[in-house]
Amino acid sequence: MEETVFLTQHQSFVFSQIRKSVKHGRLAHAYLFEGDQGTGKHLLSSWLAKRLFCTDVTDNEPCGQCNNCLRIAAGEHPDVRLIEPDGQSIKVDQIRQLQQEFVRSGFESRLQFFTIRQADKMNASAANSLLKFLEEPQGDFVAVLETDAPGKILPTIQSRCQILHFAPLNPAELAQRLVTDGITSESAKLLAGLTNSYQKAVEISQDEWFNDAKDAVAQWYLYLRKGDLMAFVYIQKRLIALAKEKEQQRLLLQMLMQAFRHERNELLRQSQTRQLLENTRNVQLILEAEQKLAANVSFQNVSEQLVLRILRQTAVDD
């Protein structure tokens, strides 16, 4: 199944924990799955629901083909429920309706299962209603709360859940996930170098600014590698217009960093020792520029100084 393949590859630790808990009958009543979007939280929730209701379990693995597994996959099993934000939030009426349905036993078995996606979006009334439900459970159930912002979940709710942390995808895994979701390989590699958050990577990729910035930094990098003074002029000519916000300024420097790191990988492959030393110094200069930007030195001053230092170094090496 899709869930098993992904979780085995990318979230082996939490997947192993849940598999052992199911196998030995030690499941908690409530879980809090926390981690970045795209790290497999909902896939594990889906796997767990299928495993609990599957009628043809083999080696602790749901078959994915029985009537129950198919209905869960289609969102049609009466004892498996999914709650998602209604607009901008999860409202108290959604939690109350869930409570009313859970007063009675499951339609087809004693067990009931529910997942709350983006649980941090519960408004105050919904969160308090859920808390009461978890404090005074009705019947036999397993609850999964999914969130990428655990700090927004009431501490009292967290204390009644077993918390499982989903690790960020490593850059190669994140890039592959982005490619699978339709982002070009070139952009996916760049995005994976800018953030380890799938959600953040998607947000950046969908911003028209990203494509303009990607092309601009690629040209800036070429000027720098050629030792061309246009790298200095280009800051005022092109980059300043793209660096209106602090986050944009930070990303522009990070994109430049990724270009030099990609160059470094190529030089390592080719065993170009002399060029590697120059590349290492350039990377250090960019790191220092990022520190100055973080200390509120203006982007223009930071960038112009960076260019002059790189060009001066290139001239000395030549």
Image (tube, rainbow, N blue to C red):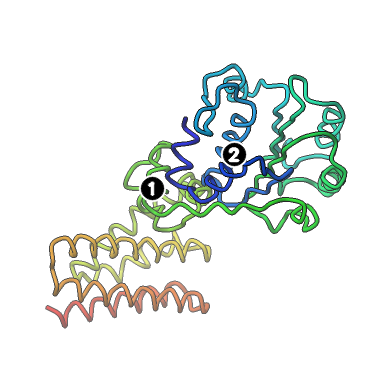
Q: Is residue 195 above or below residue 26?
A: below
Question: Quadrant of the rendered structure where residue 304 is?
Answer: bottom left
Q: Nearer the viewer, mark 1 or mark 2?
A: 2
Disc number for residue 114: none
* 68 displayed left or right of 124: left
* Viewer-proximal residue among 165 and 86: 165
Q: Which residue is mark 1?
A: 175
The residue lying furthest to the top in this view is 67
Q: Earlier in the sequence, mark 1 or mark 2?
A: 2
Callout 1 amino acid:
Ala
* Residue 52, x across and y down, in percent: 64, 31
* Distance from the alpha carbon under mark 1 to that under mark 2: 34 Å
* Residue 219, x across and y down, in percent: 28, 58
Q: Which residue is mark 2?
A: 23
Q: Residues within 10 Å of mark 2 (few under 14, many from 20)?
A: few
The residue lying furthest to the front in this view is 24
* Residue 132, x across and y down, in percent: 87, 46
